[in-house]
Image (cartoon, coloured by chain):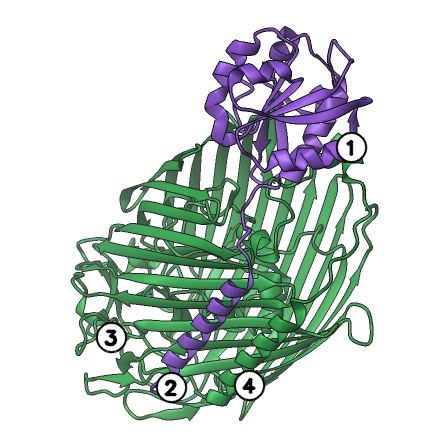
């Protein structure tokens, strides 16, 4: 094990020393004769280093206004397509696991979800956006992870590691994952990729992606098509009662994803289809006699027009209309009564009108209103009904939001709020305030935000007689960062999260009877540290995260009995290291490592929590670009090199045993890009 | 396995320290070469009543832009006039100049300099955003993308008997 790190370490040193000696090229260009138009492209701080380009790139997700990552009013991680490509990440799990504080757990029926800063965020607490479309389904609010999303289509991912409800509403209580795919401008041409992964005992994945785009002066078109087959694991699953089965051929993850974007001047439209077909056998608690299918089907459509008003274009008014239709967790009853019949379609129609006004270059106001209508239909053939006694239920929600942003020489100040009023559970009001500033090499952020989790349709449906209401959270965050050199940056942040009246899932008299209720409290506090170094030879990103639930009111089902500072499933300490090193003209080596501290979960039906030892997940990906042919990249990788066999633990006392992840997996990835050359200089 | 976490952390810290040691910290410093190129273009697109003698640029205080302007003066002329760079130690020195550059740190000097030069043909260029609105002829703006732009106060320029070419007006933001 030590030898692996020694090799990585020595490689880093070697590349550093060999590239630092490059001679400066003789400069014969007469800068003084540059025209004024040319000068307007010059940067105030000179040609940015590779790192500066990254940390000064503009982030939209945290404020709906373009601000650099160091000044954006949120604790932000920006993941670029380059980082994704160099790491050879298999899916979003590989990518998000490297984000400070983020890790995964298992819910039920094979669904793996996200936790952040020690808190289980799977059910409607982290918003996942793909090109602005809300992936979270409105029945339970989840987004399933694992061989799901088309990561080869991703241009960048903006991860807001703190609350986002003041902008995004009730699915963004603990965070926002804003996935932006490559636009027509990013891919003028066609890109094809194929990925094959082999675990120790079974096929890991076979994925195929096609991306294409064309841009003219007024028109843009982009297409992404992703088709795949995969498996969660090839290990043996053993439930709390001692029943076991091999997950090979019992844990399929087969995605189909289509994404079409069109834009004509300020008018844009998008259509997306996302289908994840899975087979599971783990059930809610006791393993089933045979595998059964669960499908997650989603369709999205959006039309948007960004009207710039006035000669100076100070006012932008953006009307937007979205439709999404989702059928999550769909199962069919079978003759052996292995599964229940669950088929509910939910349609959400959303209208949004947002106005952004630049009072001056430094002062901006955003105001808007959003209304959505939900219609859920129970298409199952059994006798289940919604709480209204019907096979159909309808709700609506109105929201109003306001934000002011002022940039001054001393500090950037943001003040915002959002008010939601739902036809069933009433209102939620979430204000936020933030101060950020960059002073040359130093930057800081001080942020306080309220956030809420909107009860979902099934939360309302399965609530007890006291009803259900939004859970509310207050989050205080401070971040400080210092640019050590032009090529390296350190950041540190602390956070304090307090949730009141959380919506809690608990098991009723029958294990198949879900119930939801607001009770107790929750929250964590902690620290996250990150170091980034980036140069022509590659980059290194190292981070450490820590949380504690000490002195926070916590619900018993989430707590660790032996350590009140810990919560089930999520490690108190976590370290990630992600690097990419260019070797020669064609090759890059991308090692990534996650050290996951001890975790707790239920492994047997004795109500005793077990401690799972710390583990190390080491991956390596070697990529050859333009090797043999222009536009052709071939990569090989090995994931979980040490064969640590990570398991997804259930973060609550729900009767589900830890679900094995993939064993050591070998991967081959081939990408071929035919890019149309850009005209002009 | 027990000590692996520490080992990783130590490796990361070591890499960080080595990187920090090897590189001089230039980060986030202003690129005054770029600002000098703008100043040179202002000399081209602004017309002074007199075209005689040296073209004198005064820099208030101690700013790296002075060194860049001195480099410029070695090879270039302002519409045929030799360029001379001087320091403006007190507001009265501005009367010796055709152009005065006020760095951000010396923004407070704008008012006394304006009072001193009154309507004389001196182009006052301020580094800090917003000073064109307060009487400077031109002030720089750094947009969200770090690109350099500039505000022009046409009436201030006219009050100093300076004529501005339409090209400059077109590319700047008019604030007065």
| Pointers 1 and 2 in contact (C-beta within 8 Å) | no
Question: From the viewer's perspective, is the residue at label 4 or at label 2 nearer?
Answer: 4
| Earlier-in-chain disc, 1 versus 2 | 1
Q: Residue at x 48, y 15 (%)?
A: B112
| Earlier-in-chain disc, 1 versus 4 | 1
Give the colour of chain A.
green
Is residue A666 or residue A388 the one in the foreground?
Answer: A666
The residue where tag 3 is placed is A653
| Earlier-in-chain disc, 3 versus 4 | 3
Chain coloured purple in this rendering: B
| Pointers 3 and 2 in contact (C-beta within 8 Å) | no
Distance (Cα) linking label 1 and label 4 = 55 Å
| Earlier-in-chain disc, 4 versus 2 | 2
* Tag of residue A665: 4
Crowd around label 2: few <14 · some 14–19 · many ≥20 (10 Å): some
Q: Position of residue A89 (x, y in %)?
A: 56, 72
Query: Which of the chains bears the disc numbered 3?
Result: A
Is residue A172 or residue A60 the one in the foreground?
Answer: A60
């Amino acid at each position: 094990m030590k030898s692996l790190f020694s090799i990585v370490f020595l490689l880093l040193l070697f590349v550093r020393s060999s590239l630092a000696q490059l001679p400066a090229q003789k400069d014969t260009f007469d800068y003084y004769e540059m025209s004024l138009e040319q000068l307007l492209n010059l940067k105030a701080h000179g040609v940015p280093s590779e790192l500066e380009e990254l940390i000064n790139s503009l982030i939209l997700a945290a404020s709906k206004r373009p601000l650099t990552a160091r000044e954006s009013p949120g604790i932000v991680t920006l993941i670029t397509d380059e980082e994704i490509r160099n790491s050879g990440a298999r899916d979003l799990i590989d990518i998000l696991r490297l984000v400070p504080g983020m890790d995964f757990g298992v819910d039920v029926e094979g669904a793996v979800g996200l936790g952040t800063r020690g808190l289980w965020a799977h059910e409607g607490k982290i918003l996942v956006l793909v090109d602005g479309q809300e992936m979270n389904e409105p029945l339970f609010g989840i987004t399933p992870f694992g061989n799901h999303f088309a990561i080869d289509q991703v241009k960048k991912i903006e991860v807001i590691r703190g609350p986002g409800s003041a902008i995004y509403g009730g699915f963004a209580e603990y965070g926002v994952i804003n996935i932006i795919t490559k636009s027509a401008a990013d891919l003028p041409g066609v890109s094809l990729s194929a990925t094959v992964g082999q675990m120790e005992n079974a096929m890991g994945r076979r994925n195929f992606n096609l991306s294409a785009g064309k841009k003219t002066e007024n028109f843009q078109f982009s297409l992404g098509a992703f088709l795949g087959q995969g498996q969660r694991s090839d290990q043996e699953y053993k439930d709390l009662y001692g029943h076991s089965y091999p997950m090979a051929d019992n844990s399929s993850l087969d995605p189909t994803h289509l994404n079409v974007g069109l834009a004509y001047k300020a008018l844009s439209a998008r259509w997306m289809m996302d289908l994840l077909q899975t087979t599971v056998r783990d059930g809610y608690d006791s393993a089933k006699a045979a595998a059964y299918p669960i499908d997650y089907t989603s369709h999205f459509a959006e039309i948007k027009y960004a009207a710039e008003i006035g000669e100076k274009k100070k006012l932008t008014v953006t009307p937007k209309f979205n439709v999404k239709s989702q059928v999550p967790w769909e199962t069919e009853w079978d003759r052996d009564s292995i599964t229940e019949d669950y088929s509910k379609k939910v349609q959400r129609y959303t209208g949004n009108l947002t106005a952004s006004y630049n009072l001056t270059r430094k002062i901006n106001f955003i105001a808007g209103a959003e209304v959505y209508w939900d219609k859920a239909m129970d298409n199952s053939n059994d006798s289940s009904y919604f709480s209204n006694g019907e096979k159909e239920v309808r709700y609506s929600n109105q929201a109003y939001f306001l934000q002011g942003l002022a940039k001054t020489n001393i500090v950037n100040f943001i003040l915002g709020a959002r008010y939601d009023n739902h036809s069933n559970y009433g209102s939620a009001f979430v204000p936020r305030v933030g101060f950020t500033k960059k002073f040359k090499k130093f930057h800081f952020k001080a942020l306080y935000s309220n956030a809420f989790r909107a009860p979902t349709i099934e939360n309302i449906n399965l609530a007890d007689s006291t009803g259900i209401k939004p859970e509310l959270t207050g989050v205080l965050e401070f971040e400080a960062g210092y640019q050590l050199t032009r090529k390296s940056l350190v950041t540190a942040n602390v956070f304090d999260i307090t949730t009141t009246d959380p919506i809690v899932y608990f098991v009723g008299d029958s294990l198949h009877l879900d119930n939801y209720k607001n009770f107790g409290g929750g929250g964590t506090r902690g620290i996250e540290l990150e170091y980034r170094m980036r140069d022509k030879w590659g980059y290194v990103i190292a981070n450490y995260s820590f949380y504690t639930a000490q002195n926070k009111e916590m619900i018993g089902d989430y707590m660790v009995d032996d350590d009140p500072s810990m919560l089930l499933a999520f490690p108190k300490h976590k370290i990630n290291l992600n690097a990419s090193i260019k070797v020669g003209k064609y090759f890059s080596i991308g090692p990534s490592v996650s050290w996951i501290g001890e975790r707790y979960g239920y492994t047997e039906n004795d109500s005793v929590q077990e401690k799972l030892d710390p583990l190390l997940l080491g991956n390596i990906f070697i990529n050859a670009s333009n090797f043999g042919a222009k536009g052709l990249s071939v990569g090989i990788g090995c994931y979980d090199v040490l064969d640590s066999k990570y398991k997804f633990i259930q973060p609550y006392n729900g009767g589900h045993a830890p679900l094995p992840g993939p064993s050591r997996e070998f991967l081959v990835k081939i990408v071929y890009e035919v890019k149309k050359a850009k005209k002009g200089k | 396995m027990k000590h692996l976490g520490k080992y990783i952390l130590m490796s990361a810290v070591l890499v960080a320290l080595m990187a920090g040691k090897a590189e001089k910290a230039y980060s986030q410093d202003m690129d005054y070469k770029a600002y000098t190129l703008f100043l040179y273009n202002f000399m081209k697109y602004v017309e002074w009543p007199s075209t005689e003698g040296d073209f004198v640029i005064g820099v208030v205080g101690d700013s790296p832009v002075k060194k860049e302007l001195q480099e410029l003066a070695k090879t270039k002329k302002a519409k045929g006039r030799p360029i001379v760079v001087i320091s403006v130690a007190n507001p009265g020195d501005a009367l010796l100049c055709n152009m005065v550059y006020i760095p951000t740190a010396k923004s407070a000097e704008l008012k006394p300099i304006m009072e001193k030069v009154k309507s004389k043909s001196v182009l006052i260029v301020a580094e800090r955003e917003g000073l064109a609105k307060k009487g400077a002829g031109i002030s720089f703006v750094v947009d969200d993308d770090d690109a350099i732009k500039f505000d022009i106060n046409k009436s201030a320029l006219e009050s100093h008997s300076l004529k501005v070419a339409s090209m400059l007006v077109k590319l700047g933001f008019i604030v007065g």
